[in-house]
Image: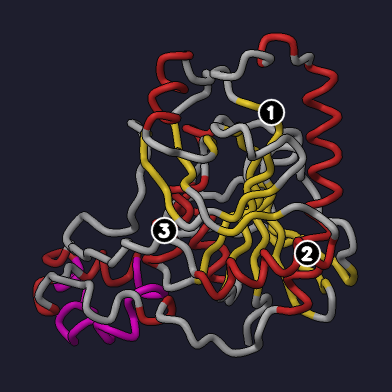
Amino acid sequence: MAQAEIGIIGGSGLYAMKGLTETREVALETPFGKPSDAYVLGTLAGRRVAFLARHGRGHRLLPTELNFRANIHGLKQLGVERILSISAVGSLKQEHKPTEFLIPDQFLDRTKQRVSTFFGDGIVAHVGFGDPVCMDVARVVAEGCKRAGVVGKLGGTYVCMEGPQFSTKAESNLYRSWGMDVIGMTNLQEAKLAREAEICYATVAMVTDYDCWHAGHDAVTVEQIIAVLNQNAENACNVVREAVAAMPRERTCKCGAALATAIITAREAIPASARERLKLIIGKYVGEPAADEQTPEGRKAGA
């Protein structure tokens, strides 16, 4: 039986989830290493959820240091079928104001050092990613913003940059010329891996400030940013609670079958080591290893 049905990933400023009851912590090992922190399992609005602090409690991990594969695989191990990912972002448009939320429906990748797939090492898969967000979940989040009294705009493009440094003005203005909406450092890899893991995924992008393109950017103080982060965290807890309460029990989207036609490698050519590493993700499509693969000699040959 699944230990959780909805995963919540908290970003900068959101290191715990208010309102969780009957909580317990679960530290997991995955085939891809350790997640950022222990998962906090509990009940929120009558639903079983798992919360993960993306950067670890105390904010110990750089965006590039995050083990995205372990974070998403850990949620899969817990039985999660939907992920609400909370992320602090900078605004690239005047109309997206600090303390407002954006629920993007597109991403642009500007990262350089990230591992963004579970596949490789003997197995190839190409999932469809033209629509990188589960719109069923995104719409529930947008409605949750309305009920929570938070400005939450549905649609827009999130630029995912490497960091940890923020953009230069030249970069910021380039993204604006492309029509981008917000900029952050974490969510694209999560979205890619969630799709491969057949988990629905949506981002709640919390605007903390205008990026460096804005004339008033240099006048913003650390104290002001922290105040916005705190307000955003409070609002995010309210929005997530509303969204979790309204989330449909059954999935009718295509996310749960994202791998159905994506695995290219011939089944007989998949190494036993890859089958074992990815059995939670691909097991329903490739079945159990052949009998000869289950022997020590077969496993050695497959590796």
Mark 3, residue position: 193
Residue nearest the viewer, comparing 32 with 272: 32
Q: Quadrant of the C terminus?
A: bottom left
Marked residue nearer the N-terminal end (3 or 1)? 3
Q: Nearer the viewer, mark 2 or mark 3?
A: 2
Residue behind mark 2: 146
In the rendered image, which residue does mark 1 sit on? 209
Q: CA distance from mark 2 to mark 3?
A: 29 Å
Q: Amino acid at mark 2?
A: Lys
1 vs 2, front mark: 2
Residue 46: name its quadrant.
bottom right
* Label 2 Cα neighbours within 10 Å, binned few <14 / some 14-19 / many ≥20: some
Q: The residue under label 1 is which amino acid type?
A: Asp
Seen at 63% across and 44% down, the residue is 87
**Callout 1 environment at 10 Å: few (<14), some (14 to 19), or many (20+)?**
many
- Residue 289 on the magenta span: yes
Residue extent of the magenta highlight: 278-299
Identify which residue is drawn at 38% across, 43% down: 108
Task: State whether residue 221 is above or below residue 127.
Answer: above
Residue depth check, mark 3 versus mark 1: number of the one nearer the observer? 1
Q: Is residue 222 left or right of residue 105?
A: right
| Secondary structure state at the residue bearing disc 2 | helix
Which structural element holds mark 3? helix
Q: Are marks 2 and 3 in contact (CB under 8 Å)?
A: no
Check the picture and name the quadrant holding the N terminus: bottom right
